[in-house]
Image: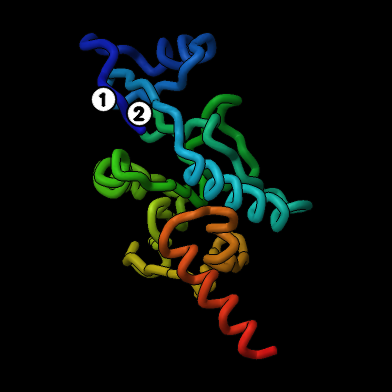
Amino acid sequence: CIMQALQSRFISPEQYLEDEKTRTIKHELVGGEIYAMSGAHLKHNLISGNVFLKMGNHLEGSPCYPLGSDMKVRVDDNFYYPDVMVVCNQTDDDYYTTNPIIIVEVLSKSTRNYDTTFKRQQYLTLPNLQEYVLIEQDFVDVEVQRRSNGWQSEHYYMGDTVPFASIALELLVEDIYYRVQNEDVLDYLAKKEQVAQQAT
């Protein structure tokens, strides 16, 4: 999540990129100021890891591939660290991209407002972006916005299948939340087990 600004003076994108190579903690650059990134919860890491793995396996042998949370996306002179991105034929820089076709952010209480407002507005200006995905970690809700339908939000829950048209992939919500323990997931799995037992 975003923490407080570390300095009040403005820093150039060039200086930020150079400094970020030697920092031990990741920082985002927003409006000329740098912001330290805090560590993520286990549920956050499980969700982003599940999505990264599924997308990576699906895209083997194609020109597209997923990137994890150590890769930056550049929007004008701002730099962010999305949880997962998919790029095709990366041609920018070794440390950032400007042309993801999918961006995935995993939400928590501390990041939800930022990711659903300011960051969303920034990301949707990227010319190659086709899908923006917001995944709640504390309850089950996968929100997908697609360029193809005017960035209208569509929501998916346990038992649903999420289509990612830009890479011809469908993911079960259950697979996105694999190993995640929140109330919605546990309730769904308990009911699924009950139905399976009744069928035998």
Q: Which residue is mark 2?
A: 78
Residue visible at 60% across and 60% down in the picture: 167
Q: Which mark is residue 31?
A: 1
Q: Position of residue 137 (x, y in %)?
A: 42, 51
Q: Which mark is residue 180?
A: none
Q: CA distance from mark 1 to mark 2?
A: 6 Å
Q: Nearer the viewer, residue 31 or 127?
A: 31
- Specify which label sits upstream in the sequence, 1 or 2: 1
Q: Quadrant of residue 168?
A: bottom right
Q: Position of residue 191 (x, y in %)?
A: 51, 77
Q: Is 30 drawn above or below residue 120 in the view shown?
A: above
- Do we see residue 47 in this rendering? yes
Tell whether 36 sits left or right of 61.
left
Say what secondary structure mark 2 lies in.
strand
Q: Is 125 drawn above or below residue 91 in the view shown?
A: below
Q: Are marks 1 and 2 in contact (CB under 8 Å)?
A: yes
Q: Quadrant of the N terminus?
A: top left
Task: Point out the residue furthest to the left here.
Answer: 8
